[in-house]
Image (cartoon, rainbow, N blue to C red):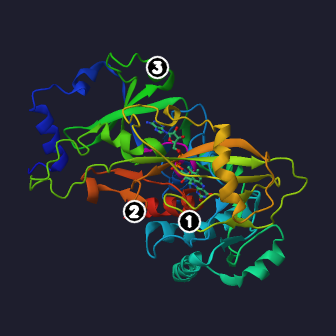
Amino acid sequence: MKPNTSTKIFRALMGAGTKPRWLEYESVPKETADAVVIGAGVVGIAVARELAVKHGGREVLVIESAPTFGTGSSSRNSEVIHAGIYYPTNSLKSLFCVRGRHLLYKYCKEHNIPHKQIGKLIVATGSSEIPKLNSLMSRGIENGVEGLRMMEGEEAMKIEPELQCIRALLSPASGILDSHSFMLSLLGEAENHGTIFSYGTTVIGGHIDEDDHIQLHIADTMAVKNWDGRSHLKPDLILVPKLVVNCAGLGAIALSRRIYGHGHGLDSNSNSNSRALPPPRPYFARGCYFTLSNVKSPPFRYLIYPIPEEGGLGVHVTLDLNGQVKFGPDVEWIDNVDTSSFLMNSSFDYSVPRDRANKFYPEIRKYYPGLKDGSLEPGYAGIRPKLSGPKQSPSDFMIQGEESHGIGGLINLYGIESPGLTSSMAIAEHVATRISK
Ligand SMILES: Cc1cc2nc3c(=O)[nH]c(=O)nc-3n(C[C@H](O)[C@H](O)[C@H](O)COP(=O)(O)OP(=O)(O)OC[C@H]3O[C@@H](n4cnc5c(N)ncnc54)[C@H](O)[C@@H]3O)c2cc1C
């Protein structure tokens, strides 16, 4: 029998002189599993639900390193239901955002998830921004976003008296939701269909065995936290699943790099492996939020967005369902991220420095001149898992299956930044359809 790619990689590693660590794991208990989802953020939960409820009722195990679900990017975002305007036509972002929005509104209505379709105004505050606003409108229409309408500044400022702009693009399809209730509801459905969520459990790596199966190395998160960083971290359990969906968010790329046989030993000069792609290079960008204090009622009824900036959508106005107003997120590229960390989520700094408000005031006052000094209070921060860096063109979501990396039964989700919350149910649908094919 002709050895396939991963067997060759395994053999290459075996023959490389260094004895792979997992050969020392004979004493570690081994379990088989049907489908394993890594990460209980909104995407992992949506994928688990889709597999358990709809696609043949798979037996799903979700492994999450944190003590509960949704503590990563899924609880550090704007909670905006995006319409699908910004993304290149036919990109995964545009397709999943539009489809995901429809699925999300329907789901929220059917399951009483708090949400509001409040609409959004994208505003041009100078004449140089008008061509960009026009192209956003054309792109939105091409992407299938309903109801987009361009309005003169006067009309926009009549609807929103605190706003200053010379033209605005109205997107009635945009809205907000309570993302925690959404995740809780999906999770409940998944559990009712037999899905098991294992919290405080970390996938520290894995390997491809001689039979070409993926084996995951699992450890208790406490042991990972207490690890001295020098000795070898041995797993507590080895899982041999039929299917693995890597929804590890900020840690997804780092994790797949620790699956031996995944991109390891792949040589660009080697013909045999030329189609197998190694995991991409990760980039990270922090975004901070400030909340508006000292106001009796919110100054806006709509979400207000400036023209997008490099790496993000611009410091915008978001309202939550309790009427609290927040501004953000800005974009701060983070260098020197230690991707060797097993717990990427907790290795980031999520604090919001008070003096960063000095950068927010002038940005916000371009469209909200009435913003009073001293009214911004530090809120929270989130980190975007990106696949392109500063000055590079924005990247799309990346979903890699066997056809990309050569490993059967493994699907990696990379770069699931905004609009990942809006897209979550469409991503889940896509993953499940791919598996059933
Ligand atoms: C600042 C900001 C604003 C945003 N605003 C919006 C918005 O308004 N609308 C929108 O649609 N989208 C928005 N997004 C995007 C959205 O929040 C994300 O796309 C979405 O939450 C990603 O979900 P996830 O499940 O992929 O990742 P996460 O929520 O990060 O979940 C990944 C999970 O995997 C776990 N994990 C990681 N490694 C391991 C391991 N080795 N073993 C076990 N578990 C592991 C982590 O603990 C974590 O719980 C925003 C994102 C950011 C950062």
* Mark 3 residue crowding within 10 angstroms, few (<14) / some (14–19) / many (20+): some
Specify whether residue 40 is painted magenta. Answer: yes
Kind of residue indicated by mark 2: Arg
Specify whether 296 is left or right of 436: right
Q: What element carries label 3?
A: helix
Q: Give the CA separation, mark 2 to mark 3.
A: 35 Å
The answer to whether 360 is drawn above or below residue 28 in the figure is below
Q: Say if residue 183 shows up in the picture.
A: no
Instruction: Nearest to the eye among marks 2 and 1: give it.
Output: 1
The magenta stretch is 35-44
> Going from the N terminus, do you reach mark 2 or mark 1 first?
1
Q: Say if residue 341 shows up in the picture.
A: yes
Specify whether residue 341 is painted magenta. Answer: no
Specify whether 299 is left or right of 330: right
x, y percent for residue 104? 64, 64
* Extreme residue toward the right, this view: 296
Q: Is mark 2 on a helix, strand or loop?
A: helix
* Mark 2 residue crowding within 10 angstroms, few (<14) / some (14–19) / many (20+): few
Residue at 40% across / 16% down in the picture?
Answer: 228
Kindly identify which residue carries mark 2: 434
Kind of residue indicated by mark 3: Ala
Specify whether 86 is left or right of 153: left
Kindly identify which residue carries mark 1: 308
Kind of residue indicated by mark 1: Pro
The answer to whether 198 is drawn above or below residue 245 in the figure is above
